[in-house]
Every structure is written in structure tokens, then in C-alpha cells.
Image: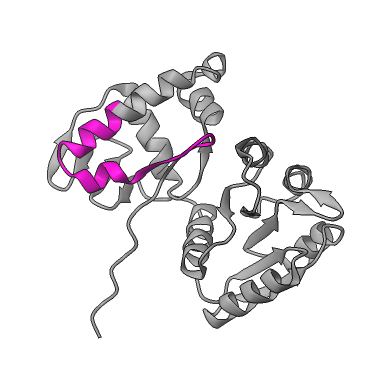
Amino acid sequence: MSGARVLVVDDDVAILRSVQRGLEGAGFEVSGLPAAKEIESTIAAWRPDVLLLDLVLPDGDGADICRAVRKTSSVPIIVLSAVSDDDRKVEALNNGADDYVVKPFSMPELRARIGAAIRRSAGQSSTILEAGDVTLDLLSRKVAVGDTTIHLTPTEYELLRLLMTHPGRVFTQRHLLSTVWGPEWQDESHILRTFVHQLRGKLHAVEPHAAAMIVNDPGVGYRLEPPLPERPDN
């Protein structure tokens, strides 16, 4: 992801400078803004690959900004949040944010989230989805953990397919229910918990690490977090 453009919007000057230094040191091209008023014009002129957006700005609310940006741009939006209220996070995700990172955060985590957002936006052209030891064939609908095929119900398959198509992305419970089950099911969170439990169980029976990739963000939703690639020994 070296060379990718990242627009950082945060009114905390110390955080803004720290993020800029950390990302530029990793090879990213970074531009920073302390307020919301120039976001849309900067996106149009500079065309960043990712927008890092503070949830609370002096001249704008993060959810409102996400909604405004989505009218003209598909740039991945990662919310930087010091807000502990899960409802605010869900609101931002439902209004167009792709992910959120809770402050304080580590630079390796932030870089990993940025990389995942860029990979998602680049699209998935292959008919084979992979995450860790799990592979999913979109044509045959075959799912395997390592060399072992696992048998999923149609609903379990659709849930796993959605999560694997967008690894690292946080899906709200309402979005998952509406997409997999239908709009009339979007408030039935107990149904989602049951199917996630079943899906994890089938993955765990073959490889516990595979089940652990399905991560619950309490009060918000779920994401599939593949393991980071191992670094070669020096």
C-alpha cells in the first residue's frame, strides 16, 4: 500500500501530526485537515485512496460528514473515534463509513485497517475468496478450512460470503440481517447471534483459529479479521 494517498481529518493537532508522521514513515502520501469545511473540495481535487475522519469535529458531526461525502465519492472512510457510545459508531457506519478505529490506537493497527480498506475498494475479481485457512468458491459454493470441506446451510454460506468479500470491514447487525435475511429481519439480532455461533462452531471444529477470525464488535456488529501475514525471518 506504499504510496497510497490518505486524507486525515482531526481537530486534535497532536493526533493529526502523529498520524501524518506515522503514515508518511510507512510510505503513504498524507494530507491533513483540522476541520470539516474543506473535506469535499479536497477529496475532489486530491482524490485520496482513504479518508480518516474524526467522529467529532468543531464544525461538523462525523455521521453527517459521511453521508455528505457518500453523495459524491466512494472513497473508503475510516472513522477515528474517542466516543464510547456504540450508537454513534453504528450511526456513522450506517451513513457510509466503512470501518472505525477507537482512540487511542496503535500505528500498526491503523496501517492494517487502511490496507484492508484499500484492498476492498480495489474490488474482488477472483471467484475464490481466501482468509487465513478458509477458502470459499463463489462458483461451486464450496467452503473449506485447509483441506477439509465444511458443509454450511445456505444462510450460513451467505453470511460467511459477505464477511469474506469485505475482510476487515465492520458490518452493523442491521446491515447483516437486512442483506442476508431481508429487510423485514433487520431488528432480529438474536437470529444473527445464533447463526454466527453456528458458523463459528463449524469452523472451530476443523481449526479454532478460523473461527476466531469472526470478530464481534459489541453493540455494533461483526467483521472478519484475517491473520496478518507472517514476516520472513531476517
From what the image shows, is residue 228 above or below residue 134? below
Is 212 within the magenta?
Answer: yes
Q: Is residue 141 visible?
A: no
Q: Is residue 41 visible?
A: yes
- Say which residue appears at 84% left-offset and 55% top-offset: 58
Q: How many marks?
A: 0
Give left or right: position of 87 versus 71.
left
Name the residue furthest bottom: 234
User: Residue 163 is drawn in which quadrant?
Assistant: top left
Residue 8 position, x and y percent, is: 69, 66
Of the 4 image quadrants, the one containing the C terminus is bottom left
Give left or right: position of 213 versus 90.
left
Nearer the observer, 114 or 34: 34
Q: Which residues are magenta?
A: 198-222
Residue 21 position, x and y percent, is: 62, 80
Residue 149 position, x and y percent, is: 15, 37
User: Residue 94 is drawn in which quadrant?
Assistant: top right
- Say which residue appears at 52% left-offset and 16% top-offset: 185
Colouring: one colour
From what the image shows, is residue 22 above or below residue 64? below
Is 156 within the magenta?
Answer: no
Name the residue furthest top: 184
From what the image shows, is residue 115 above or below residue 165? below
- Say which residue appears at 71% left-offset and 51% top-offset: 55
Residue 202 position, x and y percent, is: 21, 32
Give left or right: position of 233 versus 29.
left
User: Residue 211 is drawn in which quadrant?
Assistant: top left
Give left or right: position of 117 versus 142.
right
